[in-house]
Amino acid sequence: MNKGSRREISDLIVQHDPLGQARVPVERAAVVAELAELGQVRAARIVSRMPATGGILDEEYVNGVLFRSHAELQRLSEEFLQPQRVLALLRPTVAAYRAHATRTPIRVVDFGCGLGYLIRWLAAKGDLGPDVELIGVDFNDSLVNAASAAAKAESLKCRFVTGDVFALDEPATIVTSVGVLHHFAAQSLESLFRAHETAGVAAFMHYDIAPTWPAPLGAWLFHAARMREPLARQDGVLSAVRAHDDETLTSAARAGTSSYRIGVFGTPFALFPVTRIIRPVVGIRPELVDQLRRGLGRMHRHLNLE
Amino acid sequence: MIAAALVALALADAGLSGFRAAAGRNPLIYKAAYYKGAVLRGMGAGFGALVTIGLVTGAMIFVSSDAPAQYEMFVDGGRRMLGIYIPFATLVAAAFALYMIKSVELRSLLSTGIFGPVTLIRPIVILAGAAAAGTGSGLEVKLGAAVAAAAMLAVEPVVDRHYVNWMARAGRIAHRTRAPG
Ligand SMILES: C[S@@+](CC[C@H](N)C(=O)[O-])C[C@H]1O[C@@H](n2cnc3c(N)ncnc32)[C@H](O)[C@@H]1O
């Protein structure tokens, strides 16, 4: 079976109307059947145990499962210092943009933000400057609400909006994402990147798992040890399997856009590539590249742009 | 000495159990106080486990016809336990020491390469220690070791309950609040 055709539970138990706005009811039996057909027996079993009324998955229950799974995902980001990784590239990118453009505010938009850990962390500790606006976007409104509530609880200066990243009307200067690209089929990546260009985005950095040989094993170990929600375990391990390789990401970005320098940013393949487990595909307007390289200091060697 | 070492290891293990029960359940950014509370809660539960173990072994010594000999047998069992636990604890301590280095790559490596597997095999290590203590000893030591293992394995589930409820409350608050705008 093609590994890319397997589906994550979280992608199936939440469905939106074609505009990506309203949630639509999801039939449990249909999800179970789809997973079973793909041979994902355990995933099918997890969904078949979810409560449903009249065959329709209980939305409140689904929201609860996703909230718990995303809190566990946040822990993964905490352990891997994910926001610090993003900041190492984001800070010099913001500086490069600031040096070239006068358009403010500089809007940093995180695609598929989930509970918004990255954006909230940046608001709390990122120190990017008062001209930077921090915005998280996700099409799951229950996660967006939870992200807003968490930000409010700690008086953090950032905001969260509901929206589909393929059709976003939120203006963005720099787009980030963490662990989102593997949710999309390789064929649809191109249109995501194209939308960046159309929207006038100055730079993007999409972090996702690299499909290295130890990634599925590492993901399995990590999820077995750290995660309690069966859904989080299933999806987490699968995400390492479904992850797109560098070539797929950069060629989709090149095919979808014409005004960026494209590449990946990451330490070179080490003997044990677990240390390169999450790396971004990067696109940046050519006029910002020199400044960005200066801002990265010695790390600029790891930015391979073409 | 043997007993003191076992008590220290048990409290450290219980503190980490508390941490694990709390981790992944609080989506806030500033969590130092939350985690400190979790470690203390774990240690509290660990203290309860130690009291239980102390009462059980103490009672067996008390009713024994030769109390000093019985005491010595428990100490011997404890020594065999430490033979299993000390190498394990040293590995964990070394990983923590390295974790203090704020390198993104090193931390990722420790997380998946050491902390993950170590968490997974912890129950097996606890049982192996108890088995080592029980091997070749009398029924009392076997029983004491079994109680000790069970009590330590119970710490995390006990603390877990608290954080399951904590999270359910957090979730309800999160979902009641609507996003502004
Ligand atoms: C694996 S989660 C990652 C969440 C978060 N970035 C993190 O690192 O914890 C993927 C997120 O992308 C969101 N998502 C998937 N497709 C989307 C789309 N087309 N538009 C907006 N959000 C989307 C999902 O709702 C989910 O919250």
Image (cartoon, coloured by chain):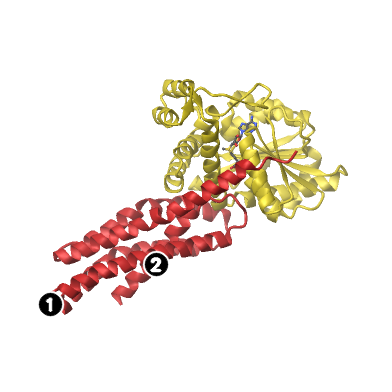
Position of residue A5 relative to residue A205, above or below, is above
Where residue A103 sits in the image (x, y, percent)?
A: 86, 42
In the displayed orientation, state which residue is furthest to the left: B65
Are the residues flagged by discs 2 and 1 from a single subunit? yes
* Residue B11: assigned label: 2
Which is nearer the eye, B53 or A81? B53
Where residue B167 sits in the image (x, y, percent)?
A: 52, 48
Label 2, secondary structure: give it: helix
Q: Which residue is mark 1?
A: B66
Q: Chain of mark 2?
A: B
Q: Quadrant of residue B81?
A: bottom left
Does any portion of residue A54 appear in the rendered image? yes
Q: What color does chain B have in the rendering?
A: red
Q: Quadrant of ligand 1?
A: top right
Q: What color does chain A have in the rendering?
A: yellow
Q: Residue at 29% x, 74% y: name it.
A: B2
Which is nearer the eye, A189 or A164? A164
Query: Circle 2: is it few (<14), some (14-19), or many (20+) Cα within 10 Å?
Result: many
Does any portion of residue A300 appear in the rendered image? no
Position of residue B150 relative to residue B72, above or below, is above
Image quarter of the C terminus of chain A: top right
> In the visual, does A137 lie left or right of A198?
left
Image quarter of the N terminus of chain A: top left
